[in-house]
Each structure stands twice: as structure tokens, then as C-alpha cells.
Amino acid sequence: MGTPEFSVPVWRTSSRSNGAMACLEVAVVPGRVGVRNSKDRSGPALVFFPSAWRAFVGDVRHGGFDHG
């Protein structure tokens, strides 16, 4: 049986979210990173391996998805 602190993910919303627009929530559990829409918390979540999530976040931080 799992330990209680890992039985239910703790979802976090970006500190940059102003509450008026849709934002992502992220939950980290051992070996996985979950991502869901904060406006649809009962909806589906995407699940990534931590290495894939780190690569994605790194690309975002370095402008890898900027269109312009």
C-alpha cells in the first residue's frame, strides 16, 4: 500500500496566473508529472516522464515555442 503523501497528487497553479484566464496545473508524483487545465479540474490530465517535462520547460524558458 502506498504512503498517504503520494496517494493523491497535489496540483499547483502557476504563480503568474491571475485567475481570469485558463492556466495549467502541475502535479509531481514519483516518476511522473501530471498537467491539467485549471478550468476543467475533473477533465483529463496529460502525464509525462520527468525528463520529458524538464526538456519541455527548458525549451519554453529558452523561447523554443515563440512565434514571431
Image (cartoon, rainbow, N blue to C red):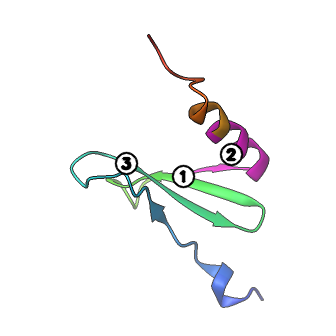
Write the residue at 64% across / 64% down: 28
Under mark 2, the amino acid is Trp
Q: Toward which corner of the image does residue 42 lie, by quadrant?
A: bottom left
Q: Toward which corner of the image does residue 33 lie, by quadrant?
A: bottom right
- On the image, the x and y values in percent for residue 18 come to 26, 53
* C-alpha separation, residue under disc 1 versus residue under disc 3: 10 Å
Q: Which mark is residue 23?
A: 3
The answer to which of marks 2 and 1 sits earlier in the sequence is: 1
Counting labels gives: 3
Would you say residue 29 sits in the magenta stretch?
no
- On the image, the x and y values in percent for residue 68 come to 44, 10
Magenta stretch bounds? 44-57
The quadrant the N terminus occupies is: bottom right
Q: Toward which corner of the image does residue 41 lie, by quadrant?
A: bottom left
Q: Which of 2 and 50 is in front in this view?
A: 50
- On the image, the x and y values in percent for residue 44 come to 49, 52
Under mark 1, the amino acid is Val
Are there few (<14), some (14-19), or many (20+) residues within 10 Å of tag 1?
A: some
The answer to which of marks 1 and 3 sits earlier in the sequence is: 3
